[in-house]
Image (cartoon, rainbow, N blue to C red):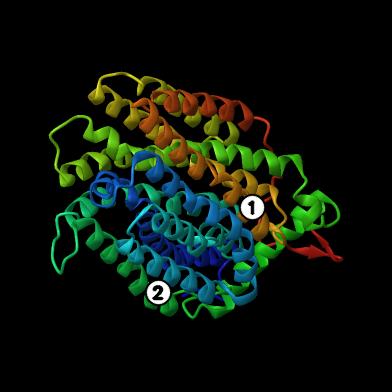
Amino acid sequence: MTSAFTRPATDVLESAVSKVKRHVLPLFLIMFIANYVDRVNIGFVNQHMETDLGIGAAAFGLGSGLFFIGYALFEVPSNVLMQKYGARIWLTRIMGTWGLVAAAMAFVWNDTSFYVLRFLLGVAEAGFFPGVVFYFTQWLPQKERGKAVAVFLAGSALASVLSGPITGGLLSIRGFGLQGWQWMFLIEGGFSILLCGVTWVLLKSHIRDASWLTESEKNALETSIAAEQAEREALGGAHVPTLKLLKDPQIILFCLLYFAIQLTIYAATFWLPTIIRKMGGLTDFQVGLFNAVPWLIAMIAMYCFAVLSAKWRFQQAWLAAALIIAACGLFASTSGNPVFSFVAICFSAIGFKAAASLFWPIPQGYLDARVAAAVIALINSIGNLGGFFAPAAFGYLQQHTGSISGGLYGLAVASLLAAAAGFLTRNRRVSHAMPVQTVHGKAH
């Protein structure tokens, strides 16, 4: 029988990639589900907090969005620290602090405490998503990263599917002088805290630390990733300093494009339960069940788009198609009929959730690996500011006009503009014929 040390190099690399996916992706998927639930569960308690604490629609929208200010301010520093301390320490730290703050949301008492804790939750979570994306650049060859990111991002759709029924059920809990929304924050935040121990045991910072890889598999992964980086540097010329890279028009375009995508995602995330309640006569649990429908559809669509874009490679075109679908659904959702509006939101979710996963392989292929962590964090932090503007604007419109139709029209236009802008992006192609052999010191 052929051993791992004598198998062809491509077989060893494929075996290593398969093991990485089996060991790392399930853990990251669970972490992302916990992360996303703690971030967006606020959307289910809008009316409860208004009734119990007097927090109105405008204050709710502002507080929901303040999360992203804290997130943006601390995103880049958090990822720089992850490079210093390693993924195991830093991602576990992120989980622990966000879990504590999420649980503390159970004890807000007015607008100000709500604003402070939402801001601190953003600070605590800063660095998680780009940290995981950067982790993939250190563990997987280029051609595998898009698939890994798609699976990882499916966690947000899966979290949205699960969070509706779970959160709706938790809102019915009463006891020890606490309301259902308080129990919801305590239980969901507490789960993230418990997950820290699992993360600490299972997560490894470097390929060399993975006891579940053979020596030949470790060598194959390290050689493949190093060779891709060397080729990227050769195609891009001399190493570009980080500050100069941040002035690159492509980086600015990536930031604006991701901003438009996130603008739509978080407007729908935070205000979808309110739209559903307009159908009338629904319990919290039923609202949660209806809330799961668009995200379930989106999760299937994300997988289909990932398969199609892998088969017919033109990432920018697929991204544009997804954004056009989102725009059409958003225009249709301005209908005065709440049931038709809900159906239209389901359609738009196909587009804006697929767009989020289709976007990341483009900047990943463009960036020098030595600055990838900081630049991915920059793109993510600026893009996620859409999560501040959308909820805040929708809350203002809801309180002062009684309708969010104007906001939906604005989101549709933003999606169309982003679809056009997507064709202006570019990424440096990297050959995937690995491992690289050398003849007279030159790569072939």
Residue 25 lies in quadrant: bottom left
Under circle 1, the secondary element is helix
Distance from the alpha carbon under mark 2 to that under mark 1? 26 Å
Q: Nearer the viewer, residue 312 or 204?
A: 204
- Give the quarter of the figure containing the C terminus: bottom right
Query: In x, y percent, where is residue 375?
Result: 67, 54
Residue that carries the numbered disc 1 in the rendered image: 378
Under circle 2, the secondary element is helix
* Amino acid type assigned to the residue bearing label 2 in the image: Cys
Q: Nearer the viewer, residue 322 or 106?
A: 106
Looking at the image, residue 309 sits to the left or right of residue 362; the answer is left
Residue 172 lies, with reference to residue 81, above or below; the image says: above
Residue drawn at point x = 51 percent, y = 51 percent:
68
Residue drawn at point x = 13 percent, y = 66 percent:
175
Looking at the image, residue 179 sits to the left or right of residue 35; the answer is left
Residue 353 in sight from this viewpoint: no
Mark 2 and mark 1 lie on one chain; the one further toward the N terminus is 2
Residue drawn at point x = 48 percent, y = 57 percent:
119
Residue that carries the numbered disc 2 in the rendered image: 196
* Amino acid type assigned to the residue bearing label 1 in the image: Leu
Label 1 Cα neighbours within 10 Å, binned few <14 / some 14-19 / many ≥20: many
Looking at the image, residue 433 sits to the left or right of residue 37; the answer is right
**Residues marked 2 and 1 touching at CB (< 8 Å):** no
Query: In x, y percent, where is residue 161?
Result: 28, 47
